Image (cartoon, helix red, strand yellow):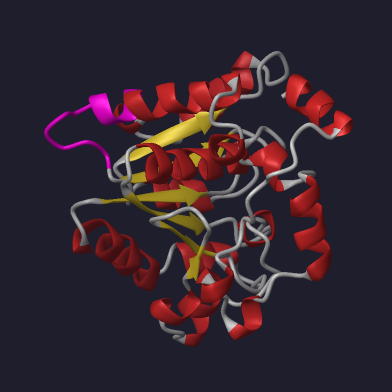
Amino acid sequence: LEKAERERESGSRRDIPPMIARDEVKPWGKPRESFRRRTAEGSFSEQQLVSFYQPKSLGAEQFRKLRTYLLQLNVQNPPRAIMVTSAASGEGKTFVSANLAAGLSKDIHAHALLVDCDLRVPSLANLFGYPSGLGLSDYLKDSRKIADLLLRTAIDKLSLLPGGNIPENPTELIGSKKMEDLVHELKSRYNDRYVIFDSTPLLATSESEVLSKLVDGIIVVVKAGVTPRETVKQAISFLDKKKI
């Protein structure tokens, strides 16, 4: 990443692909002009989406290793619905979610759906160049159709379900029967699709613990050299160890 930063500063990377599939942008999801300029300059998306922008980098290789490990957990029936969480905020769970989904779509050409379940601080829409708008929270509380909320990204076979407008009751929405039915439908409708849920931190909210009961596998992101071991132990005590 440091090498890529130096390359950007020297202007050696000039052909950076857009992160938005502009022919598929929803009326409310038109990318901001300022973001398009930032993306063209390689400032935000290039740094974050290393699986897409920097496929030969060390960072991208680590995500390929993570993907391979997940697919080898159960060769006959690998986990299809995967929740990504952390003990506390700021540990990189959204970074991992986005790059894992991008790697699954780009490297093995599998269909992937990235779902922003952090309804308190939804950020995936902005990462992919869309302004904040409708999403999962609006489906759960206002009966919006999922098909009208999905966004297509520039990565082939990768779709995004944003978090939507910040609700007053995120815990109740994630713990609702409607959310349970949605996760079941997303897991069972297609047998060739991976669904990555970017969830909230375990020790800060209760949504992750609820969502963990609905998914096939769980990735707990730990910030190396920062997160205390006891904090990690406390966080995973809320989870089914067999899913981690």
Mostly what secondary structure, the magenta segment? loop
Q: Is residue 89 visible?
A: no
Q: Position of residue 183 (x, y in %)?
A: 33, 61
Quarter-wise, where is residue 3 in the image?
top right
> Residue drawn at (33%, 67%), measured in percent from left and top?
182
- For the N terminus, the quadrant is top right
Label count reads 0
Which residue sits at x=76%, y=46%?
44
Q: Residue furthest right?
A: 9
- Please indicate whether residue 239 sits to the left or right of residue 227 in the image: left
Question: x, y percentage for residue 212?
Answer: 39, 45
Question: Magenta stretch: residue 7 in it?
Answer: no
* Residue 102 in view here: yes
Query: Magenta span has 73?
Result: yes
- Up the image or down, 143 lies above or below 182; here it is below
Name the side, left or right, on which 214 lies relative to 226.
left
Which quarter of the figure has residue 120?
A: bottom right
Q: In the rendered image, which quarter contains the C terminus?
A: top left
State which quadrant residue 74 falls in. top left
223 and 112: which is toward the camera: 112
Q: Is residue 72 above or below residue 89?
A: above
Q: Residue furthest left?
A: 76
| Camera-nearest residue between 208 and 238 | 208
Tell me which residue sits at (67%, 32%) in the image.
91
Q: Position of residue 221 (x, y in %)?
A: 56, 30
146 vs 154, nearest the viewer: 154
Left-right relation of 221 to 90: left
Give the x, y percent position of residue 198.
52, 49
- Region rendered in magenta: 69-79
Identify the residue at horizontal 49%, vertical 61% (top origin).
Answer: 160
